[in-house]
Amino acid sequence: MLTEQTQQTKPNPEVAATAKRRRFTAGEKQRLLREYEATPKGERGAFLRRNGIYSSYIDKWRSLATAGERKALEEKKRGRKVEPKPPPELQQLRLENERLKARLSQAEKVIEVQKKISEILGITLDQPDGPKNGNC
């Protein structure tokens, strides 16, 4: 709305300065759904306007209510889902795995050094031919 003298807009007293998301409890949803169903068909639009809700809310709430889930009508937490903590035994197994990997790496290095020393000294190492009993 512009005024002729100052060419500035006046704030509309009917409009809230900042919009705030409305949240309905499960009880309110059920009450509004019951009242909506009891309202004659020609007056349902007025009911929605009077309560400040959309017909899509009613449709969603009705589908959840017919599924028989009262919990479904309750408000869901918004935002990121919390990552569940791994069990302590899992952390312990990971630490043990890292420790064993380090030991394996060290043992492989020792074997490499032994091979190089045997080559330098001209010593032949006996290598196993494979499994003796035929397994693997």
Image (tube, rainbow, N blue to C red):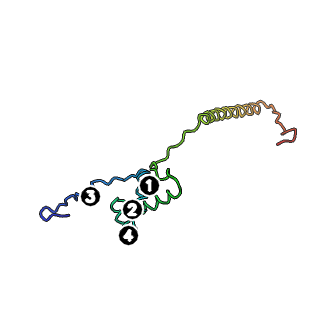
The answer to whether the residues at label 2 and label 3 have Cβ atoms under 8 Å apart is no
Q: Judge the density around disc 3: few (<14), some (14-19), many (≥20) Cα neighbours within 10 Å.
A: few
The residue to which callout 3 is attached is 15
Q: Secondary structure at mark 2?
A: loop
**Residue positioned most to the bottom:** 42
Please name the residue shown 80% across and 31% down the image: 123
Foreground mark, 4 or 2, reads 4
Q: Earlier in the sequence, mark 4 or mark 2?
A: 4
Foreground mark, 3 or 1, reads 1
The residue to which callout 4 is attached is 42
The residue to which callout 1 is attached is 30
Q: CA distance from mark 2 to mark 3?
A: 18 Å
Q: Earlier in the sequence, mark 2 or mark 3?
A: 3
Name the quadrant containing residue 17: bottom left
Q: CA distance from mark 2 to mark 1?
A: 15 Å
Figure check: 53 above or below 83: below
The residue to which callout 2 is attached is 54
Foreground mark, 2 or 3, reads 2
Q: CA distance from mark 4 to mark 2?
A: 16 Å
Q: Earlier in the sequence, mark 3 or mark 1?
A: 3
Name the quadrant containing residue 111: top right
Q: Judge the density around disc 2: few (<14), some (14-19), many (≥20) Cα neighbours within 10 Å.
A: few
Q: Judge the density around disc 1: few (<14), some (14-19), many (≥20) Cα neighbours within 10 Å.
A: some
Q: Earlier in the sequence, mark 4 or mark 3?
A: 3
Q: Amino acid at mark 4?
A: Gly
Q: CA distance from mark 3 to mark 1?
A: 28 Å
Q: Amino acid at mark 2?
A: Tyr
Q: Amino acid at mark 1?
A: Gln
Q: Earlier in the sequence, mark 4 or mark 1?
A: 1
Q: Secondary structure at mark 1?
A: helix
